[in-house]
Amino acid sequence: MSVPLQVEGLTRILEGRAVVDGVDLEVGEGRVTCLLGPSGCGKSTTLRIIAGVDRQDAGVVRLAGKTVADSHVHEPPEARGVGLMFQDFALFPHLTAARNVGFGLRGKDDARVADLLDRVGLAAHAVKYPHQLSGGEQQRVALARALAPKPRVLLMDEPFSGLDNRLRDGIRDATLDVLREEGTAVLLVTHEPDEAMRMGDEIALMRGGRIVQRAAPYNIYNQPVDRDAAAFFSDINCIEGEVHGALTQTPFGQFLTPGLADGTAVDIVFRPQHVRLDFDREGRGPAPTPTEGTPARAHVVRARFMGKESLVDFRTEIGDALVTATVPAVFLPKKDLPMWLSIRRDRCFVFPRGASAHDPRIVGA
Ligand SMILES: Nc1ncnc2c1ncn2[C@@H]1O[C@H](COP(=O)(O)OP(=O)(O)OP(=O)(O)O)[C@@H](O)[C@H]1O
């Protein structure tokens, strides 16, 4: 069976700048791909080109194997058969929930409308008008409306951004359930890593008009392609070093940095939740291990309680590096208290300083 959505080499030049720059994407049957990236990186433009409301300067869009946009072809949006759900779900204010859902259906199909309203939990609200519904309910009507004609591909642009924080997670999960039942291929644009991790089977991380990494949430979090990719998902710690003889000296002992020339400046990056703390026993700490390397003695600079966890900043004795650790629950040690910090080597990433995903110098840890 043909792939529902395929995009190759998509490029859009605006005011002399490639705001979308050679994007390749593919979304399989029943899969959710999250196009994730900071504001202005070109996510919405990509989506608009796929929908047919904007035109690419180069590249191809295929829907179910059929070319709908290339240098010769430009199928209008209504002929593409994709579902659309954008930020301001813009329900028709003069139509009831049921008539909004039925709007895009060719013939009258009350059974399909009733079924969808039921599945989004709004069977009892069918005859209400949008202004009589909450934001979350309106969002669910918009979802039902987008899915009513059974599109093979659904494009969603920040569909949850207008919703109250407390509602959002529940609505995301309910939306995913319906999308899975329908088997729709979904491309969802978001600038929130949490949303992409929660919703996506795959995340396509975008920066400066390019996809810098495509992977399952677990893999993109645990094997980021460069320092910025690591930093997009959580706070990071970064120890700076320099390669000598394929090794880099740090407060946590030596790191293997093979394949990099002597003198190359490197960043050793790790997440605060991967720092382990041990109390100081008269100047002694835990013994070095192959998995955690050499523990570093450090002093508390600052500690804050964040609700679910505490954030503690340290300064290492060797190298004077600032390292942040997260600790579950309440842990508020006094300033200057000495402790020992260890990091699991397999949780560290080594990147040549200033390198980005398109730089051939990039190497794994
Ligand atoms: N009509 C236009 N003319 C010139 N530049 C534009 C135009 N539309 C968008 N841009 C620029 O293209 C870039 C990409 O915009 P786009 O809306 O695709 O980004 P985005 O990643 O979706 O951002 P956001 O998350 O803020 O919506 C931005 O720098 C934007 O300023």
Image: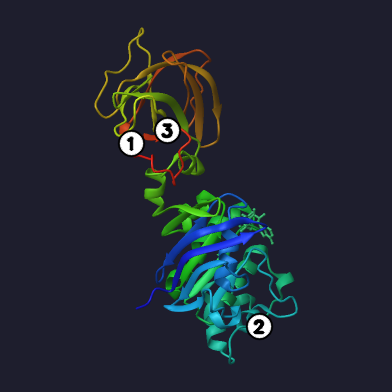
User: What residue is at 56 percent from the left and 77 percent from the top?
Assistant: 117
Q: CA distance from mark 2 to mark 1?
A: 56 Å
| Residue 77 as seen in the image, left or right of residue 337 | right
Which residue was labeled with disc 3?
269
The tag on residue 99 is 2
Quadrant where the image shows the C terminus:
top left
Q: Quadrant of ligand 1?
A: bottom right
Of helix, strand and loop, which one carries label 2? helix
Nearest to N terminus: mark 2 or mark 1: 2
Of all residues, the one furthest to the bottom in this rendering is 107
Q: Is residue 77 above or below residue 261?
A: below
Q: Are marks 3 and 2 in contact (CB under 8 Å)?
A: no
Residue 301 in sight: yes
Q: Is residue 84 above or below residue 315?
A: below
Task: Please name the residue that numbered disc 1 is placed on.
Answer: 365
The CA span between labels 3 and 1 is 9 Å
